[in-house]
């Protein structure tokens, strides 16, 4: 079972946090108190999305260029002048520029939505998740449906999960909350949307609402992997390692092949002094993925158990 780039990113962040400060900080830090209105958030999101088109001169919002990882293979991004968070080749940037011009020239909302769908796919392929979210939102505005709102919300949530500054957390988390709320208005039983909305609330002025939403998900589905995982992470962040162990134990009972669940179970067991059980969980995580970054993180954590 291959581990996703997002999951690898979180595991690497976890290992770095453990090494530097002895804690776990894999979610956006701090409780934000947004002052911007929805219209201002949308305006800034649009500006962020439309800054793309090629070259570092067009790679910039007011805080950070984008919110995706920088692949190790993106050699063009090395050096002091590298454009952050992009793996677009020259040909891909040229295509994006062409599609942006086509989008601007589209004669009506329906035509724009068609081009926006393609733009979103292209931005997603080069890991510009905020831009993908913006254009998927334009599709949803032209063709409102729970599915279209969720596609836009998911893209913004992906960008939110990689946000590196408080301002980006505020912007992208706010957009994700806004759009997931639209999804749940039409589909109140959509547990995936409710789980992500709960996590987006954890970086808002109302984190208690986030916990409440996650508990609602687990009440409806006690075996929900995403909710168990996120409740475990929240327990870790509040230094409630015994509770975190229970969440991750429940998670790997539901799905023994959940790589993140096994890894974090190892981390939390180690924190409670259960070294042998922690080692077993770490090795289980390592056996489930061929990702070298995960393997390195596991080896480092096992070395600390000796």
Image (cartoon, helix red, strand yellow):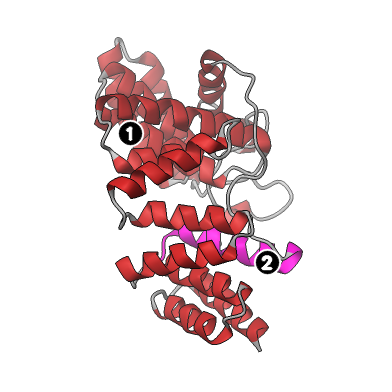
Q: Which residues are magenta?
A: 2-21
Going 33% across and 70% down the picture, which residue do you hit?
253
| Label 1 SS | helix
Going 25% across and 20% down the picture, which residue do you hit?
143
User: With respect to residue 21, does 58 lie above or below?
Assistant: above
**Quarter of the image with the C terminus in it:** bottom right
Where residue 144 appears, x then y in whole percent?
A: 26, 20
Residue at mark 2 = 18
Q: Is residue 130 left or right of residue 111?
A: right
Where residue 202 appears, x then y in whole percent?
A: 55, 40
Residue at the far bottom in the pictured view: 306
Camera-near label (1 vs 2) is 2
| Label 2 SS | helix
**Magenta stretch containing residue 282, yes or no?**
no
In this view of the protein, which residue sits in the foreground, 6 or 214?
214
User: With respect to residue 67, does 141 lie above or below?
Assistant: above
In this view of the protein, which residue sits in the foreground, 176 or 227?
227
């Amino acid at each position: 079972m291959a581990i996703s780039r997002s999951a690898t990113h979180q595991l690497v962040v976890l290992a770095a946090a453990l090494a530097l400060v002895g804690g776990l900080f894999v979610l956006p830090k701090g409780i934000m108190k947004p002052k911007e209105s929805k219209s201002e958030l949308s305006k800034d999101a649009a500006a962020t999305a439309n800054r793309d088109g090629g070259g570092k001169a067009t790679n910039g919002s007011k805080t950070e260029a984008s919110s995706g990882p920088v692949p190790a293979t993106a050699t063009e991004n090395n050096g002091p002048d590298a454009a952050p968070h992009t793996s677009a080749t020259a040909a891909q940037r040229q295509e994006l520029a062409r599609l942006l011009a086509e989008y601007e020239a589209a004669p009506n909302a329906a035509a724009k939505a068609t081009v926006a769908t393609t733009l979103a796919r292209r931005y997603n392929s080069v890991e510009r998740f905020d831009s993908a979210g913006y254009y998927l939102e334009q599709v949803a505005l032209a063709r409102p449906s729970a599915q279209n709102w969720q596609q836009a919300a998911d893209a913004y949530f992906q960008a939110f999960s990689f946000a590196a500054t408080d301002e980006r957390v505020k912007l992208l988390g706010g957009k994700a909350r806004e759009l997931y709320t639209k999804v749940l208005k039409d589909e109140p039983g959509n547990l995936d949307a409710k789980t992500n909305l709960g996590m987006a609330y954890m970086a808002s002025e109302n984190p208690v609402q986030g916990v409440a939403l996650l508990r609602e998900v687990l009440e409806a589905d006690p075996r929900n992997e995403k909710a168990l995982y996120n409740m475990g992470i929240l327990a870790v962040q509040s230094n409630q390692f015994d509770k975190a162990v229970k969440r991750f134990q429940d998670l790997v009972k539901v799905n023994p092949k959940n790589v993140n669940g096994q890894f974090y179970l190892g981390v939390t067991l180690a924190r409670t002094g259960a070294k042998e059980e922690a080692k077993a969980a770490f090795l289980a995580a390592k056996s489930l993925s061929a990702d070298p970054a995960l393997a390195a993180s596991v080896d480092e954590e096992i070395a600390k158990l000796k």
